[in-house]
Amino acid sequence: MGPTIEKVSRFLLDTHVLLWWLFDEPKLSAKAYGIIQDPYNTILVSSASAWEIATKYRLGKLPHAEEAAGNLPTLLRKARMDVLPITIEHALAAGALPGPHRDPIDRMLIAQGQLEELPIVTSDPAFEQYPVMLVW
């Protein structure tokens, strides 16, 4: 049996949760807010989220994310968040995930959550299709 939320101190943020935190959006759930602001928790951000932010900013889908697209490492340090690099194992697991969900960033976050035994902080219902611990 895997860890329960009450015993976990490491969490992986979905990209939208990261952006909501960085730009003080009121869309965060109380639970998500509590997890991120708790100084005893380690908050991880996947390298895939940086890729997603930069790509969506370039395409005009995240026009308000200029600061994140250009200065994410500094923003993460200020927010006391750590980067979760993408490993070969993560990439292989993401590519092998079954199911119809096609978003490569979501698939990477799911694979990282599974392999690293990290709950993912997300409001995205698409993650519910996979055996990964979710928090919202």
Image (cartoon, grey):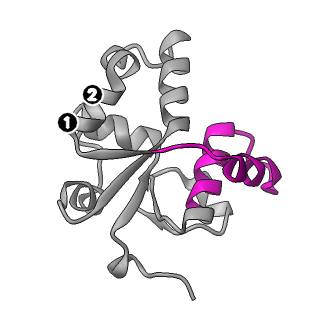
Q: Position of residue 52 (x, y in %)?
A: 54, 28
Q: Quadrant of the C terminus?
A: bottom left
- Residue under the point 61% across and 64% down: 114
Horizontally, residue 79 falls left or right of residue 115, namely: left
From which residue to which does the magenta span run?
A: 84-113
Of 37 and 86, nearer the camera is: 86
Question: Left or right: 9 with respect to 98?
Answer: left
Side (left or right) of 35 relative to 94:
left
Residue under the point 47% across and 15% down:
57
| Image x and y of residue 85, in percent | 53, 43
Q: Main secondary structure of the magenta part?
A: helix
Do the CB atoms of the residues marked 1 and 2 lie less than 8 Å apart? yes
According to the image, label 1 marks what residue? 78
Q: Quadrant of residue 98?
A: bottom right
Does 14 sit left or right of 30 as displayed? right
Q: Vertical placement of 112 versus 2: above or below? A: above
Label 1 packing within 10 angstroms: few (<14), some (14-19), many (20+): few
Q: Amino acid at mark 2?
A: Thr
Real-space Cα separation, disc 1 to disc 2, in angstroms: 6 Å
Please, what secondary structure does the residue beneath circle 2 have? helix
* Pointer 2 residue: 74
Question: Residue 131 location in percent, x, y?
Answer: 65, 69
Check disc 2: other Cα within 10 Å, few if <14, some if 14-19, many if 20+: few
Which amino acid type is marked by label 1? Lys
User: Could you say whether the residue bearing mark 1 is in a helix, strand or loop?
Assistant: helix
Considering every residue shown, the one lying at the far front of the view is 88
